[in-house]
Image (cartoon, rainbow, N blue to C red):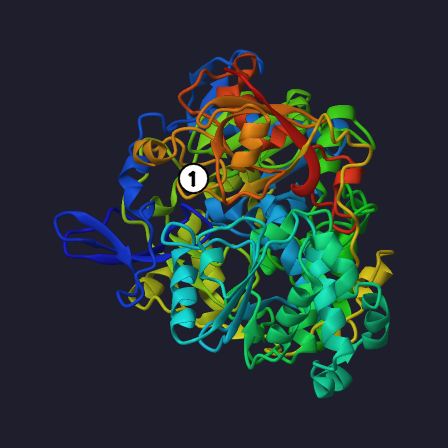
Amino acid sequence: MAAINCGETRYSTCVFCDGGCSVAVRNDGEITVSPLDPAAPAICSKARMWREYRDHPDRITQPLKNVGSRTAPKWEPVGWDWALDEIAERLSAVIDAWGPEAFAVSEMPLNTGFGGITRRFMNHLGSPNYMAPVLLCMGNTAQVHRATYGWFTAPDWDKADVIVYFGQNRGPELWPAEFLSLKAALERGAVLIEVDPRDTDTARLAHEHLRIRYGTDAALLLSWINVIIEEDLYDRAFVESSTVGFAELAARVREYPPETVASICGIDAETIRRTARLYARAEAAIIPWGVVGDMQKNSTSVLLCQCILRALCGFLNASELVFGPSEGQVTNTQLSDFVALSTEQKEKQLGSDEYPLLSFKGMELYDTASRAAGLDHIPDIMGCSCTAHPARVFEAMRTGAPYPVKAFFAVGNNTAMSYANQQGIIAALLAQELVVVFDHWMTPTAQLADYVLPGDAWMERDVVGPNFDVAPAATFNQAFCDPPGACKDWYYVVKGLADRLGLGEVFPWNDCHELYDYLLAPLGRTWAQTCEQPAIPTRPVAMGSFLTPSGKVELKSSVLEALGCDPLPSYEDPSEPGADCATYPLVVFAGARDKCSYNTNLHQIPALRKREPEPEAYLNPADVERFGLRDGAWVRVSTSHGSVQLVARADVRQPEGTLRVPHGWWKPEAPQGLDQGLSAACLHNDGMLFCDEPWNLDRVQGLPNLRGGVRARVENLE
C-alpha cells in the first residue's frame, strides 16, 4: 500500500512495545498518530516517534553481505536477488550435508507482522528447530493455561472488583491501555493487591502490597490455595462439577501453611491469610498476565497456581474468560501446515525429552480434545506449542551434540541478547556455516551474521493478524508510509527462498496481499474489501469450554503427568547451589521493562536515550553505603557466570540485599564487531549474568531463572 494521502485516515497497531496499542493515523497535511479510541487515550510517546525510527540514518535499508569474518565483519551492499540466491545455495548445502534439522530459527512474529509463514517454510523443509523469545514471555504462560483449561484466559476489566498483580508496573509509558483499565477499576472501587518486592509506582496504588522475597511467588500462591481450601472459601459447586484433581491438590497445599510460607516469603502469616480471603471473597477477581512470573525457577508452578485460583474461586467464565481457538480466517496454525513435518523429524526436536510441554510431544496430547471441539488440527497456542528448547539449540550449534546445527536465521529478533547465557549464544553463532538476520539495525546479532536483510517496520506494512493464535480477535493494520530504500517484508524473503529451494508451490502467493486474500477467503473477503470495512469477524471455538484431555479444569494436569512432569504445583528454593554469599552478597533480579526501550530495541532514538542515557542498576541506599559505592558511578556487577558494567543508583524502593539490573542494553553508537564487544552488548546486557544450565532452569519448561536466587556482587569501576 502506498503512503497515506492527504485527508485520509488509516489504522494500525504500534509494536514499539508488546502492549500493542491501536492507533489511527491521519494525514491533514501532516501525518499524526493518535489513539484509535479518543475516549481511551492509550498511546505512549514512543508511537509518535515513528519518523525518528523510520528515517534514522543508521537504519539498514539494503541487503548486506559480510565479506570479512564473523569476529571482524566487513559489509558490502548487494542486491536482493544476489542475497537470496546465495542464501538459498548455502542453506541447501547445509541441508544436504547435515539434514534439515541442522537449520534453526529464532523469530519474533510481532516484529515482522507474520505468523505461521516461517513455520510453514521450516515444516516443508523438514526442520523442527523453531524457537521464539516469546517462550520467555506470554508463550509459556499460554501453555500452562492450556494444560489447566485447554486454552488461554483473559481478564474482564470492566467487571473486576479485586485485581492481583504479580510484579506488574503499569503507567502512561508502560502498557498504557492496561494502565487506563487499572485506573478505571480503582476509580469505581476495585481493590488492588500488588505482589512485588519493589515499591513501584503501581504498588503505591495498591490496597495491599506484599513485598515478598524475589523468587518466592509460587510459595505465596500455594499458601493462598491452602487458606482458601482449609477455610472452605472455594466454589464447591464449580469444583465438584467442572474440575478434576481437587483431592490431590488439597493434599499438596497442606505442605504450605501460612506460618511456613511466611518465613519463605519474608511477610507475616496474617497478611497471607488476609489477602487470600480478599481474593476468594471477591465477586469478580482477576489476575492479569505479567512477565515477572515467566522467568523464575518456579515459573510453571506460579502459573499453575494462578490458573487454579481462578477456578477454585469460581471466576472462570465470569471475570476471567476462557477463550477457545478461533475460526473464520485461515489461522496461523493452519498456515503453518504442521502435517508437512514428518513424525521422524518431529522426534528430532531439540530439548523435547527434557522439557516436553512446549514441544511437539506436548502439543499432540491435545489431539482428542481438539477433534472433539470440531477442529481438524491441533492449534498452536501463542506460537509456542511445538518449539525447540533454546538452550539445547544453542548447545547443538556450539558442540554438534546430539547432532550438528549449522544454519541459523534470526528473524525480527536480536537473538544474541534475548536469552540467558549470551556468551554461549555468541559461541553458537560463531560456529555456524550460515547466519542470516532480518532486522532494521546492525544489532549485536547482525554483527555476527553472513547476511543482514533489511525489514519493514510496523508503520510501513499492511497486516492481517493476529500474529499468534491465542484469542478470538483478528487484526487489520495499514501501512501509512513507504519503507525506506530496499526494505522488504518478511514474506518477500520467505517466498524468494522457497522459490529457489523448490518449494514454490507451497508459497503460491506472489506477495503479502495475495496471501491475505487467501487468509480471508473463508470469510468471503479480500484485502481490498477489508480496507473498506476493517472489522474482521471471528468465531471462538468452544467458547467457555475446557479443551483439556478430561474436558474439565485440571487442577492436577494430565498433560504434565503424561509428559513425566509433576502434575501439581510446588515450590523449590531458587537459591543458587553452592553460592558463596560472602563473595556474592546480593540477590539479583533481571528483565524488568524500562519505559524508554522495548527489550533490546529503541536505544537508537535520541529523545528516548536522553531520558535513559545509560543502563542503571538499582540498589537500596543501605547497600550503596555498605559496599562503598557512589550514586551515579559506574560499577561492575558480577555473578558466578559473568559480569556487566552498569551505573549504580541508590533507590529506596529496592529491597535491601537485592539488586535490579535492566534488560536489553547495548549502545548502537559504540564500535561494532566481536572484538569491540558487539556495540557494548557484552558490557551491559543482562544475558551475560545468567547461565542456561539445568540448575537455573524451571524443571518443566526450561525457562531461565532471572527473578531471584542467583547471587551477585557489585564493585566500583571508578
Name the residue nearer the viewer: 642 or 371.
642
* Residue 374 in sight here: no
x and y, in percent, of residue 455 in the image? 42, 37
Give the quarter of the image for residue 514.
Answer: bottom left
> Does residue 477 appear left or right of residue 289 in this picture?
left
> Does residue 129 appear left or right of residue 492 in this picture?
right
Vertical placement of 440 versus 125: above or below? Answer: above
Give the quarter of the image for residue 516.
Answer: bottom left
- Crowd band around label 1 with a 10 angstrom C-alpha radius: few (<14), some (14–19), many (20+): many
x and y, in percent, of residue 129 in the image? 70, 41
x and y, in percent, of residue 518 in the image? 48, 60
Name the residue nearer the viewer: 454 or 549.
549
Vertical placement of 577 versus 536: above or below? Answer: above
x and y, in percent, of residue 372 in the image? 72, 77
The residue located at (40%, 36%) in the rendering is 602
* Residue 227 in sight here: yes
The residue located at (82%, 73%) in the rendering is 250
- Label 1: which residue? 597
Q: Amino acid at mark 1?
A: Ser
> Does residue 378 appear left or right of residue 108 in this picture?
right
The residue located at (51%, 50%) in the rendering is 199
Vertical placement of 36 versus 512: above or below? Answer: below
Name the residue nearer the viewer: 66 or 715.
715
